[in-house]
Image (spheres, rainbow, N blue to C red):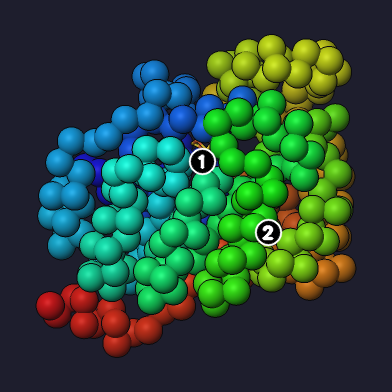
Amino acid sequence: MIISLFDPWRSSLCTCPKKYSLNPYTGCAHACVYCYITSYIPRAFEARLKRNLLKQVKRELLKLDPRFPVTIANSSDPYQPLERDYKQTRSCLKLLKERGFRVQVVTKGDLVVRDASLLAEMHAAVAVTVTTLHEGTAAQLEPGAPSPERRLRALQELAERGIPVACRIDPLIPGVNDSAGELVRELAHIGVCHVVSSTFKPRPDSWRRFAEAFPEAAEKLRELYFRRGSRVQNSYYLPREVRLELLRRVRDACRRYGISFATCREGLKLNTAPSCDGTHLLRLHAGDVEHAQGS
Ligand code: SF4
């Protein structure tokens, strides 16, 4: 199956509403230091096409319930470099539109702006991840992804086209990108209406990459993660009070600027939004669902 129920390792800390997950590509060329897909996708940073993707998506969509949204994508970026030539994400969006599905795009790729007209005609919302305004830090954290400036411009262009936009300030890493106040101010100025944020939850392989890229920060964090923190399934968590302090600061900044806020798999009661993942930004017209089901 190419489309599955969204289920991040059956985590009891996940508060996402029911939704489907679709990854138009296998792997991701953005190669983020903190990425968790390396723990379950072989050659994870070598992005590749999926065989018979569109045929299969078309077939699977006939069996799925269009009342539930589709998030695109969780284990690869839908607007990574391959998309420029192959337009697999764009083709999937067209199929989703035909069937009346609501779609939540999650990306770091400013190529998403190419599809603004299509997205504006759908029940779609776009979340762009921006972890820092500092270009150098972003280049170290997310070596294959567009710069923060390009991502912010993409958010602004989408917002100007009337597409609901959210930002994922995710992950927050103490000593690396833990002061999001200025970023939140920028987001408010651009028209972002929702922020999702969470702390870095390394697995053994992402910790190794992080420690290589940020040796000094890793040295300072080692004790927090592995002695004072906790382990949830295969991920290491910072101590609760550290996470609370980091995320409270982001929430308070969001409050100041009238942006709704939620955390992701933290188990903290900080959310001010009706949904954690921003699905509340999607517009649902019952008539569209009935039409899609009957056609
Ligand atoms: S963009 Fe997302 S899927 Fe791609 S490498 Fe970065 S964190 Fe992983």
Question: With 88 as the anchor, is 162 left or right in this view?
Answer: right
Please report whichever mark, 1 or 2, sits nearer to the chain's N-terminal start: 1
Task: Please name whichever residue, 204 or 131, is drawn nearer the observer in this view of the structure.
Answer: 131
Q: Residue 256: which quarter of the image?
A: bottom right
Q: Indicate the quadrant containing the N terminus: top left, top right, bottom left or bottom right.
A: top left
Q: Indicate the quadrant containing the C terminus: top left, top right, bottom left or bottom right.
A: bottom left
Q: Where is 37 relative to 53, above or below? A: above
Task: Please name whichever residue, 12 or 24, is drawn nearer the observer in this view of the structure.
Answer: 24
Task: Please name whichever residue, 142 or 66, is drawn nearer the observer in this view of the structure.
Answer: 142
Q: Residue 228: which quarter of the image?
A: top right
Q: In this view of the protein, can residue 180 be seen by the observer? A: yes
Q: Could you tell me which residue is drawn at 60 percent across and 74 percent down?
A: 160
Q: Could you tell me which residue is drawn at 70 percent across and 35 percent down?
A: 138
Q: Position of residue 194 (x, y in %)?
A: 66, 65
Q: CA distance from mark 1 to mark 2?
A: 21 Å
Residue with the most extreme bottom position: 287
Q: Where is 49 relative to 225, above or below? A: below
Q: Residue 143: which quarter of the image?
A: top right
In this rendering, the label closer to the viewer, 1 or 2: 2
Residue 195's disc number = 2
Amino acid carrying mark 1 in the image? Ser
Q: Position of residue 22 (x, y in %)?
A: 34, 48
SS under mark 1: loop
The crowding category of the residue bearing disc 1, from other C-alpha atoms within 10 Å (few below 14, some 14 to 19, many at least 20), is few
Q: Position of residue 209 (x, y in %)?
A: 62, 16
Q: Where is 263 relative to 81, above or below? A: below
SS under mark 2: strand
Amino acid carrying mark 2 in the image? Val
Q: Could you tell me which residue is drawn at 41 percent across and 55 percent down?
A: 71
Q: Which residue is mark 1?
A: 11
Q: In this view of the protein, can residue 19 be seen by the observer? A: no
Question: With 217 as the anchor, is 155 left or right in this view?
Answer: left
